[in-house]
């Protein structure tokens, strides 16, 4: 039975902070598709389109009929644990620092035999298990054998906590508490057991009944002044709390309507870039190093960085053309941030919502994403340890069209959707 | 189709470059010293070596052809066989056919590896495409976890106990001491074996080999040539080789020997009962027991009872891994796949000294190598005997 997570004792501040050694990250190009699917929370293996056999490990040709027509397909993960072992030795530093570590050998009902990390509630072989793909601390997919049914405190398994970024008992920064999304996120995080949520607000002298007062009354919440357009403001806050933040959620954004022709000058576009792109850059420069330095700091280590982007980051939505461009820039920057955070063991989660049901999307028809639904998706992404999230029906539909052919989507959008 | 025999082929001049735990030398140094020993012991000139096989993991970026320039050889027949524990059997089979066909007169079969501090870990990380993608990221530190699975399943199925594996290990340590091991100097008791620290349960410390640096080598030539040179030699009576056998077994419960062993004994004109000594590939003791079963010394899942009723020491009733095997001599990379062959040649040619077995006239050497994912892919075996 999984022991529920207990709050660790207060850390002795003079003791050295344990540094992160990520598990082996090298994978072949084909195998990275397993990671790409796991990054979105799916367990996919290659299926041969000619003979129908499921393949593992990932390969270039079918191991049965040699066909090159292998397609990644979602798997149920049901299987039989054939044998298990407990490692008391490893040549790899990540595992050496976390011994003992349990592994299993599972025959999937779909055919292949897979090596897996083993959830603590799977105690003996043979046994039925459910295999899933998760990202490990190197940001690469690994397979995990879970008990077939939910067990108490399942998420608190120490192995699984290395793969996830559960906000429970952690300290978080939400960069903008003035918006409906920010306030919904704070409420969802508190509900998920967050220890402390610092909530930024750019203009602390104003309260204007924005709902900020309501979340400020929550005992876990501390309001902090934070203006992403102001380098000094970002740096000062990082100096104050940067060494304590476990998860950064950057939801601050400026969103104005229209594209190029409806407005004179660049002020609105500049304001969008100032927060959506340069603000994200300032935040990453100020908070990134401290987060990286605490990636292995006990059971409540620093673990994740969440960027609230937009589905318009994938393809420009002309009625919100300059906003789309700023989010595309932010998306590109987020890829850079992920590349820099990954070797340190910090997960960068990119959230691509469709239009949110707020003032700036007033003229768009439904379905629109409720701020509460976006907040829930963020918490779920952290719990599952996924990297790429497309919450809501609009985002899912755009994603499907974009995956199908981004050039066609671009022309559809130019013609009005 | 019946297999053609190996009439007229001589296997001779077993040499060993003594093992060390770590070395600052490169693999080429160990290969060079092995070649030097082959030349010194045979009296041949370097120019007379016209065939070469190299088995080595730590040679990169070179392959066998780079070795020819490094050592100033000009062979007319060359093979690169970096297949771990199956290297010896595979090299011998290929060299024997080359000699029979006249493609080479004298083939030097050399296996060597160096071992720097940390080179074992680095080798594991890049061992194979599948291991990089599907086992190494799980922290098992090489094949320990895979053999833990195989051992656990074997124990559950056959009723084998840790003590059954321990008996084999204890006997091999006694053999290593008789052979003057440079890596281990103390005897091993069954109690010490059982009390060892766990590595990957149910595998404990003395179930694992110690990676080290060293080399093993031998020559293959015609019987006539060996007689002319006055070299004692063994005849190759039979051989088999099989890769990726039983791939539809969900996990490894048997090796490829099952597929071809009838051919092996038919070719040699003998049965398991006629074999005077056995050298198995022993990277983990469970594999030793699987080889006893696979090669017909006992039935499937009966190896635990088989080892309980016998002594596998060099002077016992079932002499096995008479130089200590890798478990007690150390694993010098691919040279581990030659260890049984050089020892068998010493037994047959009267060079084993005090540890000569009761019946050294006919021996079986088996090879087993290359865990690229969840099981060992290469299996093989040869039967060597006194020349007629």
Image: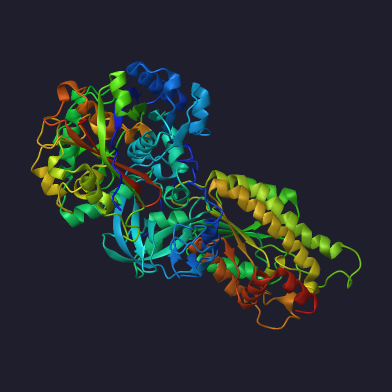
- Pick whichever, B355 or B177, lies toward us: B355
- Pick whichever, B311 or A119, lies toward us: B311
Residue B69 location (% of width, % of height): 53, 25
Identify the residue shown where x is 39% and y is 41%: B83
Residue B198 seen in the figure: no
Residue B43 location (% of width, % of height): 35, 16
Residue A317 seen in the figure: yes
- Pick whichever, A66 or A9, lies toward us: A66
Locate residue B72 relative to residue A127 in the image: left or right: right
Quadrant for residue B270, please give it.
top left
Identify the residue shown where x is 78% and y is 59%: A273
Q: Residue furthest bottom?
A: A365
Residue B140 location (% of width, % of height): 38, 46
Residue A405 location (% of width, % of height): 69, 70
Q: Residue furthest left?
A: B309
- Pick whichever, A35 or B95, lies toward us: B95
């Amino acid at each position: 039975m999984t022991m529920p997570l207990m709050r660790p004792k207060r850390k002795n501040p003079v003791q050295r902070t344990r540094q992160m050694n990520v598990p082996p990250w090298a994978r072949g190009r084909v195998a990275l598709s397993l990671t790409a699917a796991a990054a979105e929370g799916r367990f996919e293996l290659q299926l041969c389109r000619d003979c129908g056999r499921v393949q593992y490990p990932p390969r270039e040709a079918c191991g049965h009929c040699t066909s090159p027509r292998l397609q990644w397909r979602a798997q149920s993960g049901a299987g039989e644990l054939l044998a298990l072992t407990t490692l008391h030795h490893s040549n790899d530093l990540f595992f050496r620092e976390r011994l003992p570590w349990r592994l299993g050998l599972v025959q999937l009902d779909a055919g292949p035999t897979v090596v897996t990390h083993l959830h603590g509630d799977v105690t003996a072989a043979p046994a039925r298990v459910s295999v899933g793909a998760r990202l490990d601390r190197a940001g690469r997919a690994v397979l995990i054998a879970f008990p077939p049914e939910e067990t108490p405190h399942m998420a608190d398994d120490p192995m699984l906590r290395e793969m996830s970024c559960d906000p429970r008992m952690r300290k978080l920064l939400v960069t903008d508490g003035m918006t409906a999304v920010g306030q919904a996120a704070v409420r969802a995080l508190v509900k998920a057991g967050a220890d402390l949520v610092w909530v930024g607000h750019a203009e602390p002298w104003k309260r204007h009944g924005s709902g900020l007062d309501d979340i400020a009354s929550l005992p876990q919440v501390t309001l902090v002044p934070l203006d992403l357009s102001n380098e000094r403001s970002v740096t000062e806050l990082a100096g104050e709390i940067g060494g304590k933040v476990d998860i950064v959620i950057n939801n601050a954004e400026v969103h104005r309507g229209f594209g190029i022709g409806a407005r004179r000058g660049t002020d609105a576009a500049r304001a969008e870039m100032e927060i959506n792109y340069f603000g994200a850059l300032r935040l990453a420069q100020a908070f990134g190093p401290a987060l990286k330095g605490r990636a292995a700091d006990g059971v409540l280590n620093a673990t994740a960085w969440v960027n609230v982007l937009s589905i318009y980051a994938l393809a420009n939505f002309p009625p919100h053309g300059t906003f789309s461009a700023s989010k595309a820039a932010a998306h590109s920057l987020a890829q850079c941030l992920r590349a820099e955070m990954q070797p340190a063991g910090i997960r960068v989660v990119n959230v691509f919502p469709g239009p949110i049901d707020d003032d700036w999307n007033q003229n768009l028809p439904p379905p629109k994403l409720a701020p509460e639904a976006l907040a829930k998706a963020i918490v779920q992404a952290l719990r599952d340890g996924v990297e790429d999230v497309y919450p809501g029906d609009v985002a899912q539909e755009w994603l499907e069209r974009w995956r199908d052919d981004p050039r066609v989507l671009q022309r559809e959008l130019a013609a009005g959707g | 189709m019946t297999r053609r025999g190996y009439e007229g082929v001589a296997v001779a001049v077993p040499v060993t470059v003594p093992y060390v735990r770590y070395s600052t030398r490169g693999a080429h140094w160990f290969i060079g010293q092995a070649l030097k020993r082959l030349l010194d012991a045979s009296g041949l000139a370097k120019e007379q070596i016209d065939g070469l096989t190299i088995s080595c993991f730590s040679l990169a970026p070179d392959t066998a052809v780079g070795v020819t320039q490094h050592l100033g050889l000009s062979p007319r027949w060359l093979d690169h066989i970096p297949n771990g524990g199956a290297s010896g059997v595979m090299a011998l089979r290929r060299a024997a056919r080359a000699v029979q066909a006249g493609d080479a007169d004298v083939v030097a079969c050399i296996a060597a590896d160096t071992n720097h501090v940390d080179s074992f870990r680095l080798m594991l990380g890049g061992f194979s495409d599948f291991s990089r993608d599907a086992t190494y990221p799980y922290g098992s530190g090489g094949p320990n976890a895979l053999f833990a699975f195989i051992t656990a399943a074997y124990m559950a199925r056959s009723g084998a106990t840790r003590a059954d594996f321990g008996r084999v290990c204890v006997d091999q340590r006694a053999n290593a001491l008789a052979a003057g091991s440079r890596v281990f100097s103390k005897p091993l008791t069954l109690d010490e074996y059982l009390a060892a620290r766990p590595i990957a349960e149910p595998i404990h410390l003395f179930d694992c080999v110690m990676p080290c640096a060293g080399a093993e080598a031998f020559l293959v030539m015609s019987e006539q040539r060996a007689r002319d040179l006055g070299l004692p030699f063994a005849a190759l009576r039979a051989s088999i080789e099989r890769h990726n056998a039983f791939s539809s077994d969900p996990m490894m419960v048997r090796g490829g020997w099952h597929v071809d062993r009838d051919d092996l004994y038919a070719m040699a004109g003998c049965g398991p009962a006629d074999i005077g000594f056995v050298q198995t590939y022993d990277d983990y003791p469970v594999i030793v027991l699987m080889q006893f079963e696979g090669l017909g010394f006992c039935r499937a899942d009966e190896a635990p009872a088989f080892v309980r009723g016998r002594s596998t020491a060099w002077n016992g009733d079932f002499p096995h891994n008479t130089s200590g095997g890798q478990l007690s001599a150390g694993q010098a990379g691919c040279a581990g796949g030659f260890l049984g062959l050089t020892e068998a040649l010493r037994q047959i040619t009267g060079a084993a000294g005090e540890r000569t077995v009761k019946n050294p006239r006919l021996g079986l050497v088996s090879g087993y190598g290359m865990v690229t994912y969840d099981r060992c892919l290469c299996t093989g075996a040869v039967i060597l005997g006194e020349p007629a």
